[in-house]
Image (cartoon, rainbow, N blue to C red):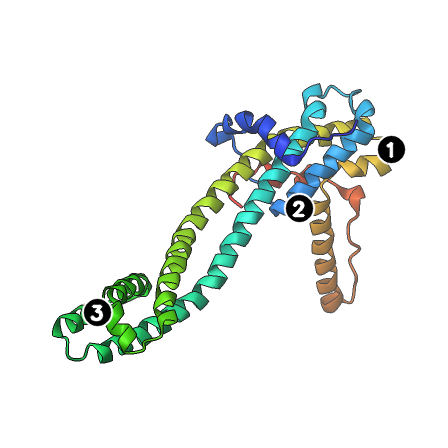
Amino acid sequence: MVNEKTPKECFDELEKALLAIPEKEIVYTTMPYEVAMQEGQRVAALVNKHGERLKCSDIDPVHLDTIFERAGAFAYCVGVLDSFVKIAESHEEIYPKKKIEGYEVRKDLIQTLEYVFRSDRKTLDAIEKIKRGAGDLDMIKDLNAIHMLCMKNADRLSKAHVDQSLIEKSLQLYKELSQLTAKLDIDPKRIDEAKKMCNRAWTYLWESMKEIYAAGKYVFFKEPEIQELFYIDYYQNMGKDSNKNIGNKETKSEGKTSKPEGKENKSEETESPETSTATV
């Protein structure tokens, strides 16, 4: 059985079911989202390979029939979240550079305007109001106010040979910084919503994964090489690393080496973190 649906198609198919999950029933994975996504895809591959044998257990067939869509929907949600995080990081990287540029243009134009209008009390008062601004948001507003003041006195500035590109730059930076500020405000909200949908998709995926794990351990209990595939690699590897660290400590303190546990020492504790309601 090959699933030819894209992650987006899987998500669209299951979106209503995901949104219908009650808040109190949402499960939070203790694995990183990328790792959880890979584990879901791995389980789907196991079903593709061992599906007929798994049917010999009393597992509800719906879990075998929908694991591909559930894994695909979760993969889509993780992809959306990752894209939002990268966009936010990009905005956070660009904003400081643009902000510095904005302050420089503001300073240069204020100095220029103060000189050109040194004998114009009314215009100097307007410039003084602009100078009172403090903070990034005021700086952004000042760029627009300065541009409007320049446009209002375009002829005077032209006669004084003021660099027109600097005036145009003030408007450009005003627009860019305004957009970036809005995005920096929106980004955390979008990321939070994407995380919530990831958790819903994981809840739906985990519902089937844990049943498939249980069925696989039962059906293949006399075939340990296959049975071991129905344990979560992430927690098995964590257990090995933990045992290695313990072994290293014992070697230093007692001159003995502790043998790391292999997959033959599996227990249900390796999956129990997935039933936790602790937020990632």
Tell me residue 244's x, y (percent): 74, 58
> Badge 1: few (under 14), some or many (20 or more) residues near its Cα, within 10 Å?
few
- Between 147 and 176, the residue placed more toward the observer is 147
Q: Nearer the viewer, residue 145 or 68?
A: 145
Tell me residue 43's x, y (percent).
73, 35
The mark closer to the camera, 1 or 3, is 3
Q: Which residue corresponds to the image point at 41% horizontal and 70% vertical from the top-left? A: 101
**Closest to the observer, 100 or 184:** 100
The answer, for residue 159, to whether it is visible in the render is yes
* Mark with earlier residue (1, 3): 3
SS at circle 1: loop
Circle 2 sits in a helix, a strand or a loop, which is it?
helix
Among numbered discs 2 and 3, the one appearing first in the sequence? 2
Question: Residue 132, which numbered label?
Answer: 3
Instruction: Tell me if mark 2 has few (under 14), some (14-19) or many (20+) residues whose alpha carbon lies within 10 angstroms of its own.
Output: some
Position in image of residue 189 (x %, y %): 43, 45
Give the residue at mark 1: 223
Q: Earlier in the sequence, mark 2 or mark 1?
A: 2
The N terminus - image quarter: top right
Q: Nearer the viewer, residue 112 or 129?
A: 112
Residue 126, quarter of picture: bottom left
- The CA span between labels 1 and 3 is 78 Å
Q: Secondary structure at mark 3?
A: loop
- Residue type of the residue flagged with mark 2: Val
Q: Inspect the image, locate mark 3, and give the three-letter code of the amino acid beneath it.
A: Arg
The residue carrying mark 2 is 35
**What is the x, y in percent for residue 15?**
55, 29
Q: Would you say 232 lies left or right of 73 here?
A: right
Circles 2 and 1: CB atoms closer than 8 Å: no
Q: Nearer the viewer, mark 2 or mark 3?
A: 3
Q: Are marks 1 and 3 in contact (CB under 8 Å)?
A: no
